[in-house]
Amino acid sequence: MSPLYARHKRTTLAIATAVAAGALLSTGLTTSASAQTPAEVAAKPLAAAPTALSSAARTTLLQKAQAGAARTAQHIGLGAKEKLVVKDVVKDADGTVHTRYERTYAGLPVLGGDLIVHTAKSGATEGVTKATKSAVKVASLKPQISAAKAEKQALGAARTLGSAKSSADGARKVIWAGSGKPVLAYETVVGGLQDDGTPNQLHVITDAASGKKLFAYQGIENATGKTLYSGTVTLNSVQSGSTYQLTDSARGNHKTYNLARKTSGTGTLVSSTTNVFGTGTASSSSSDQTAAADAAYGAAETWDFYKSTFGRSGIKNNGVGAYSRVHYGNAYVNAFWDDSCFCMTYGDGSGNVDPLTSLDVAGHEMSHGVTANTAGLNYSGESGGLNEATSDIFGTGVEFYANNSSDPGDYLIGEKIDINGDGTPLRYMDKPSKDGGSADYWSSSVGTKDVHYSSGVANHFFYLLSEGSGAKTINGVSYNSPTSNGAAVTGIGRAKALQIWYKALTTYMTSTTNYKAARTATLNAASALYGSTSAEYKAVAAAWTAVNVS
């Protein structure tokens, strides 16, 4: 789970997602490259852009890939003890298919062993992108420590990492390949609550020979409605008898529930006798429907953004909607996505009158789900920073896409929810260090920062790629983005930058991608979409150089 923000130095919002954990966290004419259509799509179809797949077509591709998995494993040179399990598939407009696989070794899951096979329309394999370059081979599958000891070690690690109210339900044997030579290990998932009240889903990897902790990441990555943040909006509902239920049948039957201050369960489906949800103002009442209206609206706009911009049908690209829960806990100042329940959860903020249901927060949360179901970026170190940045990038995309005059698109994160109590946003993409903790540029120590601060490098890259460096005003907000080398960067526009980041995420990034590998992934994406000699490719290289990634 990853909350919207981390509690360091200052209250910064961190949003959360399970398995790939992560937390959270002006309408005016602009003279910059951001003057684009609300749909945020490229001017013409791109041969290497993903094409929308019907549920039946996607299922057919997945089944075909799984049926041929043994042959594929042999073709790409995997060992006799290794097997492939299909996770996802992306098909480009030109017929190229990118199939994402998880891997097993002697029947054990290989964590950090995921890979993507790129296949041309002709059926020829064009290449393989692997999370680890090391061959998966383990001399002995007999642990030297017990599962009980690994579980005890994991509970100790959880307490150290801020999860005192924790519990574990056993440890499973795995092969850990996420940080060098593959080794036999145990994975323990620690539940309970984090110290701030956020649900806990800490994955701890313990060496099965030495008992040493090898890795840990958080699996929780911190919705007519009269909303608090987006004005009066149109919502889809379903009539049941004399009441209307907040169910969006046009978007995978997304539902919005009220937890009424509880911290577990689904809650009660939000309903109304008038088909009007909310009042447009905040209320401390746990039965207030304004937060639900914001949550439902945010979910709808996020669904439409992904569908319109990338042809993606829902978080898992299978046409199935998630669900949202509002009024979580008491004065809970955070929001999180949990992939295990496939749901978004929002607290009501300080005094229960500042719900964390703004549009970019909703987009951020659901995007953690997209990451979990594509690249699966580990929520720790540099890959964790990229995970958080991906949610900030697509959350920003949602806000611009919605084109809502009550919440105009900007490159600020969480500017509506006043998490700091002084009117300042949670994060700034043009100059991340303005929040007091985020990194503007890459350094060898970036991976040691909290993921909500190490994300600054990718957020800054995305802003520079979209808008360029220097001073400018976009939708009434002033920006002044610097570069590490002092060189000017010219942006290519947000629409193209989004296409490049999405393609990199879904077809070239893996669970262990770091900043150097992200540079390669986005260059590969730019090359596939626009050509290796294009202005877009050169802009990607320049923007990474500007944030000191080479």
Image: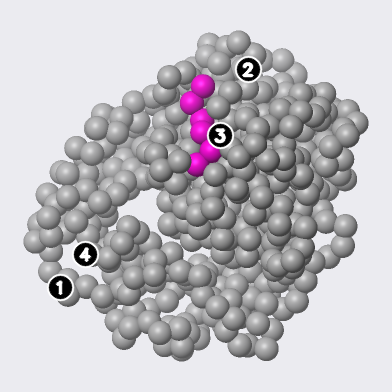
Q: Are marks 3 and 4 in contact (CB under 8 Å)?
A: no
Residue 162 or residue 412, whichever sits in front? 412
Tell me the residue at 75%/19% (across/down): 280
In the visual, does 157 lie left or right of 542? left
Of pointers 3 and 4, the one earlier in the residue sequence: 4
Q: Is residue 398 magenta?
A: no
Q: Nearer the viewer, mark 3 or mark 1?
A: 3
Circle 2: element type: loop
Is 266 situated left or right of 80 in this image?
right
| Type of the residue with mark 1 | Ser
SS of the residue at dot 3?
loop
Residue 138 in percent (x, y) is at 22, 73
Residue shown at 15% from the left, 43% from the top:
152
Question: In the rendering, at what x and y percent does residue 491 appear?
Answer: 76, 45
Per the image, the residue denoted by label 2 is 424
Label disc, if present, on residue 140 of the rendered structure: 1
Query: Distance from label 3 to label 2 (Cα)?
Result: 18 Å
Disc 3 residue type? Asp
